[in-house]
Amino acid sequence: MLREHCPALANKTYFNYGGQGPLPTPSLEAITSSWKRIQELGPFTTDIWPYISAEVNKTRGRLARLCHVPPHRLALSENVTTGCVLPLWGLPWQNGDHILISDCEHPGVVAACHELARRHQLEVHSLPVKQLRQGRDEQHQTDSEVLAALEQQLTSRTRLVVLSHLLWNTGQQMPIAAVAAELQRHPAKPYLLVDAAQSVGQIPVGDAAKAADIYAFTGHKWSCGPEGLGGVAISERMLTEANPTLIGWRSLQDETRAVADDPDPFHHDSRRFEVATSCVPLMAGLRCSLELLEQEGSDNDRLVHIQAQSQHLWKELDAIPGVTPLLEGPPPAGLVSFQMNWQATRSTPTDLVKALGSEQIWIRDLADPICLRACTHVCTSENDMQQLTQQIRRLSEAQP
């Protein structure tokens, strides 16, 4: 089992996979082995380049298969934010264009969009999805309401729609493939940027990744890979219509030269959005983590397991007086967000996270909406959930 390979899970009750997953020992060993091999070959010798090229190509191919896209559409990135921002800023913007961004996006993406709007005199509008909390059993209702809200908010000037696959705060799933299809039918044909931080590694992503223009993810959350490595699936039209933003030797067709009069210096595939030197040993670690994850079952098998765990936790929390899950029904994946009667406990969410941490139970608090979030994973045990619910019940009943 993957859990047995994660020393970080041996001495704590861990529910923060949506922030960062534990690194399995075999993945750490793969990283170390790669470091050693690089030093054996020499970090800057003629012998090293075939090794580095093979590592990059294997990793690109592996992540492309995960996203169900051809390798030329998969750019390697350091994290979700760079995966979103580098292609985003290369779009052909015109003054007065509109960005439609959901009201449940991560602050990193929100800030990037607002700064982009400031520099290019764009307008930013909100797509309301925060109130959609039907859960898994009524996903069809969520899908319909998202598409209705989208139709209402789209204008002739909408150039980009920003929407996460799984909302990082409420845990509700968004119908990305259906949204993409709707945008293609719209006269303005807006681009679709998807923050996939909470989807890759816990739900099947192929249909969404194929449909989006920018589908950015990281390896260090649900996939339990090392921090510092992720990817972004990019549509064909992005490859022809968007320009590189941060420029480096990896962006260039010929990395050995750059001349002022070269009319076409950049790669025509996803590499145009890669920049420069990356940490190659991390690639072996991420591939190892993905292999270990696959040993837990197919994408669908793992999702069924995660859903069973999150449904159990959702029910247990819902049964505690003073505790209210954000979703009205069982979560569609592993994010279980809930609120407590803060006045009755006389504690802030941060206080409660610290109190749980003192018992080696790790969840996190979120600011918008104000809530606590626990994440169930294929590594989550029944004992983990029992420990959490027991402590939540104790804290909800405590009167300081």
Image: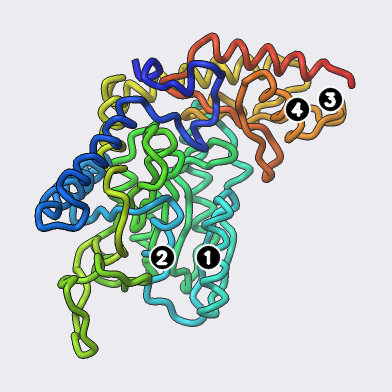
**Residue at horizontal 46 percent and vertical 55 percent from the top:** 81
Q: Secondary structure at mark 1?
A: helix
Closer to the chain start, of discs 2 and 1, is 2
Q: Secondary structure at mark 4?
A: strand
The amino acid type of the residue labelled 3 equals Thr
Closer to the chain start, of discs 2 and 3, is 2
Q: Is residue 141 visible?
A: no
The amino acid type of the residue labelled 1 equals Cys
- Quadrant assignment for the N terminus: top left
Image quarter of residue 83: bottom left
Q: Secondary structure at mark 2?
A: helix
Badge number at residue 88: 2
Compute the Cα span from label 2 to label 1.
9 Å
**Residue at horizontal 59 percent and vertical 20 percent from the top:** 314
Mark 2: give few (<14), some (14-19) or many (20+) Cα within 10 Å. many
Residue at which label 1 appears: 113
The amino acid type of the residue labelled 2 equals Leu
Closer to the chain start, of discs 4 and 3, is 4
CB atoms of marks 4 and 3 within 8 Å: yes
